[in-house]
Image (spheres, rainbow, N blue to C red):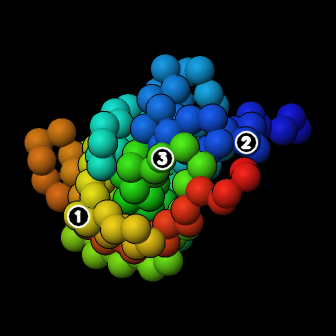
Amino acid sequence: MSRPSILPPDFHERMTGLETLRAMIAGELPGPPIAATLNFRLIEASEGVAVFEGSPGEESYNPIGSIHGGWAATILDSALACAVHSTLEKGERYTSVEMKVAFVRPIYPGKPGRLICRGSVINRGRTLAFSEASLVDEAGKVYAHGTETCMIFPKQEGG
């Protein structure tokens, strides 16, 4: 099994968060391996916003024949965190502190098809950022909603 492509360790020193996300969309930097595993991808990024699309497949079934809630939680977490990531200056880092998810309706294999997850920053302070995201089908029907708190780490002097 080959090792998936990952970001170079110093990417956050050379690029802003938004530059990094846009480079992923353009194929200039690798996306996160989890997105390939679970069949979703980043399709749009702007200041304070990250949009993903995905179609869960057989790899995401749960024992009762619907799509596991972990699939929805993972695409939500990606949109929530990447919305915050889009606000980072060169040298800043962040980590998720807390996430809440509400599963609004079940997702069944092949139905509804492509899902869109749009995350946006509610508030970005010096050390904390808050974001929200919804997972919807192409008609706008909501399948899950989430909120997240991220801790921001300022650029280290000399690094």
Q: Is residue 117 above or below residue 113?
A: below
Going from the N terminus, do you reach mark 1 or mark 3 first? Answer: 3
- Mark sitting on residue 122: 1
Which residue matches tag 2?
Answer: 10
Nearer the observer: mark 2 or 3; the answer is: 3
Callout 1: 10 Å neighbours few (<14), some, many (20+)? some
Going from the N terminus, do you reach mark 2 or mark 3 first? Answer: 2
Which residue matches tag 3?
Answer: 89
| Dot 2: element | loop
Find the residue positioned furthest to the right: 1
Q: Is residue 62 visible?
A: no
Q: Residue 154 appears at what percent x and percent y? A: 55, 62
Q: Residue 117 appears at what percent x and percent y? A: 30, 49
At a point 31% along the width and 37% down the height, the residue shown is: 46
Nearer the observer: mark 2 or 1; the answer is: 2
Measured Cα–Cα span from mark 1 to mark 3: 18 Å
At a point 30% along the width and 49% down the height, the residue shown is: 48
CB contact under 8 Å: marks 2 and 1: no
Q: Residue 126 appears at what percent x and percent y? A: 40, 68
Going from the N terminus, do you reach mark 2 or mark 1 first? Answer: 2
Circle 1: residue type: Ile
